Image (spheres, helix red, strand yellow):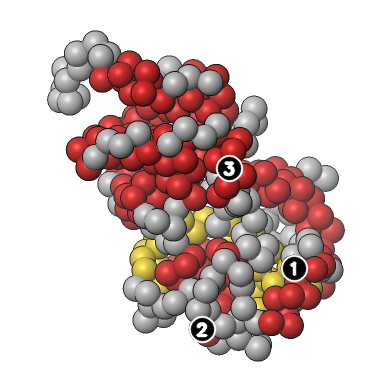
Amino acid sequence: MAKRIAVLGTGSWGTALARVLAKNGHEVIAWSAIPKEAEQLDRERVHPNLPGMVIPDTIRFTTDIREACEAQDILLFAMPSVYLRATAAKARPYTAEDQTIVDVAKGIEPDTLLTMTGVIQDELQKDGSHRGIRLAALSGPTHAEEVALDMPTSIIAACRDREVAELVQDVFMNTCLRPYTNTDILGVELCGALKNIVALASGISAGLGYGDNSRAALITRGMVEITRLGLAMGCVEQTFSGLAGVGDLIVTATSMHSRNNRCGQLIGHGMTPAEAVKEVGMVVEGINALPAALQLARRYQVEMPIVDAVDAIINHGANPADVALALMTRDRKTEDNRF
C-alpha cells in the first residue's frame, strides 16, 4: 500500500532514499532548509554528489517544514547528526501525535548521550506531546552513491516494536534494497555512530602507508571495542556481527565513498584534521561522534584504545605514527574473553 512520506534533508543519502521510495510507488516530498538547494534539485533533477542518478519527477521539493510534515504517514529524518535536534524542533508543531518516524542519521549527541532516535523523541516530547510516536532507525552498509544506482544493498530496519520495523521493511524493500528487521535499536544505532571513528583510524593507517594487515586489525579490534561497549549498555551481541555492526564497519573503513575513511587518509598524509575535513567537503561524522564515545566509555568503564587513539590525533594534535606505535606496544592482551 502506497504511503505519504516526507524526507527531511536533501543530502546524498536523503535524496537517494527519496528516489527509492518514489520508485516503490510512495508519494514523496523532500524538505531542505536551503532554498537554493531545493530549487536546484527541483529544476535540474540531479544531485551533485550522486553522479548518474536521475531524481524522479514525482518527488516534490519544499523549504516549508509545515508542508513537509503535515498529514504524512512517515517522516524520514536524513540530515547530519549535528542538525537533527534543530530540525526536530522545527517539525514538532506539524508532526502528528502518533507519527511514525524513521531516522537515518548516525551519531550520538554529546552530553545527553542520546542516540539519534532518542534526540528526536526528546525534542518532540519537550512540551509533553507526541507520546504515541513510533521511532525506527534505518542503518547498515549503505553508501548513497551505490543505492542511487540500484546496486544490490542490504540494510537494517530497527525498532523495539517489531510491527513498526516490519512496516519500514515493507516500505523500502525492492529488488535492489533488501531490509532486515532488528528490535535491538540501541545496538543498531550505537554501531552506526561508532563505526565512523574506527573508519577514521583505518584511513589514517592507510595514509601512513600501512597495508591490509593493519586495516584488518583495526577493523577487527575496533569491532571488539564497539561490541564491548554495547554489551555493557545492554545491547544484543548478535547485532554487532550483523549488517549494522561488522557490515557497516567494513564498508565504511574500506570504501572509496567513505568520508570518514577519506578524511583519515588525508590526516595520515599529513593534513591537520581541520584541513582534511575542508578537503572532504562534507560532514565527517566520526569526528562528531568522538566526544560522546569517550563519555560513554568512561560512564560504562569500557576500555576503547582505538577510540582514544583517534581522539588523541583529532583533538589533541598527536602524531599519527607515534599513536600507531603506542597502540602496538600496549601491554599484552588475550583475545579469549573467557579469561
Point out which mark residue 24 bears: 2
- Judge left or right: residue 88 versus residue 209: right
Earlier-in-chain disc, 2 versus 1:
2
| Residue at image point 42% right, 78% down | 150
Residue hosting label 1? 37
> Residue flagged by tag 1: what amino acid is it?
Glu
Quarter of the rendering occupied by the C terminus:
top left
Q: Secondary structure at mark 2?
A: loop
Q: CA distance from mark 1 to mark 3?
A: 21 Å
Occupied quadrant, residue 147: bottom left
Point out which mark residue 277 bears: 3
Q: Residues within 10 Å of mark 2 (few under 14, many from 20)?
A: some
**Residue at the extreme front of the image, as rendered:** 270
Occupied quadrant, residue 41: bottom right
Taking the image as drawn, is residue 244 in sight? no
Is label 2 or label 3 in front? 3
Taking the image as drawn, is residue 229 in sight? yes
Q: CA distance from mark 2 to mark 1?
A: 24 Å
| Residue at image point 53% right, 28% down | 314
